[in-house]
Amino acid sequence: MSEQKKKVVVIGAGPGGYAAAFRCADLGCEVTLIDERETLGGVCLNEGCIPSKTLLHIAEFIQEYKTSYEFGFTTISSNDKLLLDKTRDYKNNIINTLTSGLGNIASRRKVKHVKGYAELISDTSVNVNDVTIDFDYAIIAVGSSPISLPNSPIDERIWTSTEALELREIPKSITIIGGGIIGLEMATIYAALGSSINIIELSKDLLPDFDNKSASIVKKSLIEKGCKFYFNTKVLEIESLPNNLTIHCESDTSFTIDSDIVLSSIGRKSNAGKIGLENTLITLEKGDIIPVDEQCRTNVSNIFAIGDVTGMPMLAHRATHQGKIVAEVISGLNHKFLNGMIPKVAYTDPEIANVGLSESQNHLGIKIKDTSFPWMASGRNLASNGGNGLTTLHYCPDSLRILGGTIVGKNASELLGEISIAICMGATLKDMALVMHAHPTISETIAFAAEKSLGTLTDL
Amino acid sequence: MNNEKFLLGTPTAYQFCDDNGIAIEMVAKALSKSFLSVEDVQVFLNTKSSGKYESIKNQVSKYWDIDHAAFGEIRIESVDNFSKITAENLTAAVQVIPSVTHGDNFSIQKINDFRQQIKEELKLQNRNLTLLPFIIKAMAKSLKQFPKINASLSPDGEKLIYKNYIHIGVAMQTDFGLVVPVIRNVDKKNLLEIIDDLQNLTTLARSKKLKQEHLGGASITVTSLGKMAGLRFTPIINPPELAILGVSKTLIEPVWNGQEFLPEMKVPLDLSYDHRVINGVLASHFMADIGNRIANPELILV
């Protein structure tokens, strides 16, 4: 008995959209993947995660290179400089490798990639390039774009992260408005490239999603790299002058900052408003967020939404997991998206990464205690010139179960996975301490933090 | 820590619950665990589908894992589904319920005399009057006096649920296995109505036409061997009921009346009961009450 293949249209080919499309195809659906870009991968691959990590790697190398005289290099000179064209090519090559790889994966799965601007025209059809495509199911994965600064002039010297990652030039001075994760990553890149950095932040401190002790390590490091922070500060106006931009600020007093470039990173907003949702029965929340249930289904039962259009946290890995769940739901499985354990990372120098619950993320009123191990006491960290760092486990004092973890330090993002597994497998502090970690490694600091709280630590 | 708010199992355990359409919170509660593995969820599903039967069966199945053919010629026949369901129910009862059986013989001399008197009349009405309807009616009357026996335990054993109705299950052997249809509201029915219900249910059972409405919800069950061999037996309680009454074939006993032994017709009754709820004194009183009504059927009829 042959069954008609389910027709699925995925709008948006970012990490959520392509994962959903590929998984749908694997589960036997006929899939059309629509995106405005020539290449797959969305913001993440083309102008977000991947290019920023490429430049952050270069920034890290520069920092390391600058200190290499400490271990005997004599060839370092203040005249060393980057050939920006070459740097840009290097970055673009990496993007091309990944996006063309995605293209191959798509065609191997017979996912039809349509380049164009998609507009839903009903609950069962979408218009793209003046062609109507009917679908049984649609998955909205159109992501987000930077929020533009209010009251700002039109000026090429006002960037968002997109322009910053194009690596147009290395400005003498950059003023970053918005000290969130994106702003701080851009600060890390351009500080290493030699720009002087001002960061203006409306709230009283940076990285509010991470615990204070860990976040302050990042702050201290950025200050050491020459970043100047202006907290509790509001931008009133940006004035375009021939030689620079003047930013009028208000804190306790009013003052101005002159800067070659202004980088706006005050947040991102959902692109849901741009795809003809008014032609469907889908209703939006908070202006442009598509509300979905635990299977990522909108209020129209055959239309799903994943990723940034479904609200915070706007993270690629969240979108990918949602995308896979949706594909499985469409194929008839009763899977649900588990919202709890979404890792959060700022790829600053040093990196800071968090998963699960911590004191500052404790919305549940659960009893939480912390135990930490400083990286300055880690042999491996000192041996590899790793700088300051801290591994913190957040745990339940009654059951000793690991509830969360925060790591700040070099490659913190890579170490976080161990804690994610620990939380999700129900591990306790004792489990973490009893699992043998190789020596010397930074991952030992996780076991050390556990041992410290259990009173079995011999490394401190 | 309030675990209900945090992760209750591994990612696979969560997905396995989703796949089976059950809430992980419910599974964690049922198993009294704060964190579940896939195996835990599987244990829950097994227990749910067949009492504790599956898991226990798996533990002890080695005792049946014997190569019988090594000892001589054998023949293998599949156990039919109906018998499997009965087996699960009985195994659960035996594994879970600490049961005790009380037995005694009670005079049915008066019932017998009465039956002889009205036998012909009932025959004209196309009715067959056996001992069983009297016993059923006596049980209903006694249950009213002993409400603690007309009850069931909650699944966790934490609560006793009293029933304000009296429904009596009657175990019946059919060609395809054992069934227990239920006579409803026995306390509100007269003897003739009970005779009719019994006849009706027997016909339905034998023609495999019993429906859901004829089954379940009993206060107690009665199982009668009729005239078949066996002086007495220890019936197995039909969960979630608290007791079952076994009836064996009538016999004639010599009874000393102060001067001489006289033959008296008696029925052996065996009451198996759930000792978690019913103690021996209560069971004995309940048994005596039924016996007294049978011996003095005017107590049944009024």
Image (cartoon, rainbow, N blue to C red):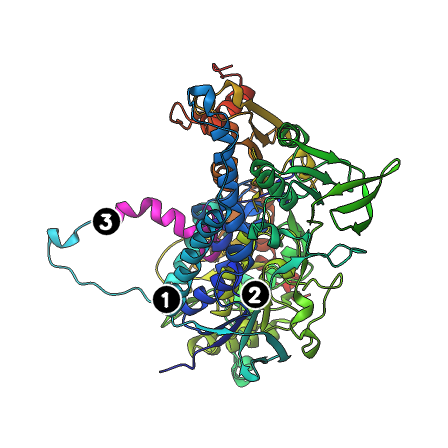
The amino acid type of the residue labelled 1 equals: Asn
Residue B81 is labelled as: 1
Q: Residue at x 55, y 34 (%)?
A: A402
Percent coordinates x, y for residue B142 in the rendering: 63, 56
Q: Are marks 3 and 1 on the same chain?
A: yes
- How many other residues sit within 10 Å of disc 1, few (<14), some (14-19) or many (≥20)? few
Residue A406: quarter of image: top right
Residue kind at label 2, given as amino acid type: Phe
**Looking at the picture, which amino acid does disc 3 mark?**
Asp
Residue named by callout 3: B65
In this picture, is B260 found above or below A59? below
Of the pair A194 and B295, the residue shown nearer to us = A194
Label 1 vs 2, first from the N-terminus: 1
Numbered circle sitting on residue B134: 2
Chain of the residue that carries numbered disc 1 in the rendered image: B
- The disc placed on residue A146 is none
Mark nearer the N terminus (3 vs 2): 3
Numbered disc 2: secondary structure: helix
Q: CA distance from mark 1 to mark 2?
A: 34 Å
Q: Chain of mark 2?
A: B
A353 is higher (above) or lower (below) than A155: above
Mark 2 nearby-residue class (10 Å; few <14, some 14–19, many ≥20): many
Q: Is residue B56 magenta?
A: yes
x%, y% of residue A8?
Answer: 50, 74
Image coords of residue A221 (percent x, y): 62, 29
Spatial distance from mark 3 to mark 1, Cα to Cα?
21 Å
Dot 3: element? loop
Q: Is residue A93 left or right of residue A201?
A: left
Q: Which residues are magenta?
A: B40-65
Residue in the image at 60% along x and 40% along y: A190
